[in-house]
Image: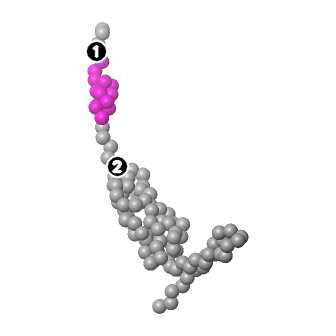
Amino acid sequence: MIQKWFHVLFFKSRNWPPYHLFFPDVSCGLADKTTNADIKYDGDGFGKIARYSCRVGYFMASGNSFKTCTGGGTWSGITPQCQRKLHFITSDLFFFHSCFNSKQPDYG
């Protein structure tokens, strides 16, 4: 198997020789999907990021909000789990409801 690499040249200053860095030219493909979430990519190569966001009405209960493409061609991190938000009715709402739905006294 032939491994492709890409080359990055860094200059510390004019008085120092440049640093030559080589990174594997890999593709991680698509990150793992999860229900009730969207994924946005800035690419699928080494060092690129996949960002997860839960849909409206859901929250991220576990996992990572982003993954990074590793040199081994896999996405780092744990796939998030999005769970439905729970809405509780408070006693204030019950009080409000009972005030407007009760019979008004007859002052006749």
Distance between mark 2 and mark 1 Cα atoms: 40 Å
Q: Residue beneath label 1, please? A: 105
Q: Is the magenta stretch mostly helix, strand or loop?
A: helix
Q: Where is residue 18 in the image (x, y as percent from the top left)?
A: 65, 75
Q: Residue at x 45, y 62 (%)?
A: 66
Please state if 43 lies on the left or on the right of 85 as rendered: right
In contact (CB < 8 Å): disc 2 and disc 1: no
Q: Residue at x 28, y 21 (%)?
A: 103
Q: Position of residue 53 (x, y in %)?
A: 44, 57
Looking at the picture, tell me which residue is in the foreground, 24 or 29. Answer: 24
Q: Position of residue 45 (x, y in %)?
A: 52, 74
Magenta residues, start to end: 90-105
Q: Callout 2 environment at 10 Å: few (<14), some (14 to 19), or many (20+)?
A: few
> Dot 2 lies on which element?
loop
Q: Residue at x 66, y 71 (%)?
A: 11
Instruction: Check the image and report above or below for 34 versus 96.
Output: below
Let me know if residue 97 appears in the view: no
Q: Which residue is drawn at 28% across and 23% down?
A: 102
Does the magenta-highlighted stretch encompass residue 67? no
Let me know if residue 50 appears in the view: yes
Please name the amino acid that badge 1 sits on. Answer: Pro
> Dot 1 lies on which element?
loop
Q: Residue beneath label 2, please? A: 85
Please name the amino acid that badge 2 sits on. Answer: Lys
Please state if 59 lies on the left or on the right of 24 as rendered: left
- Across the whole image, how many numbered discs are drawn on residues? 2
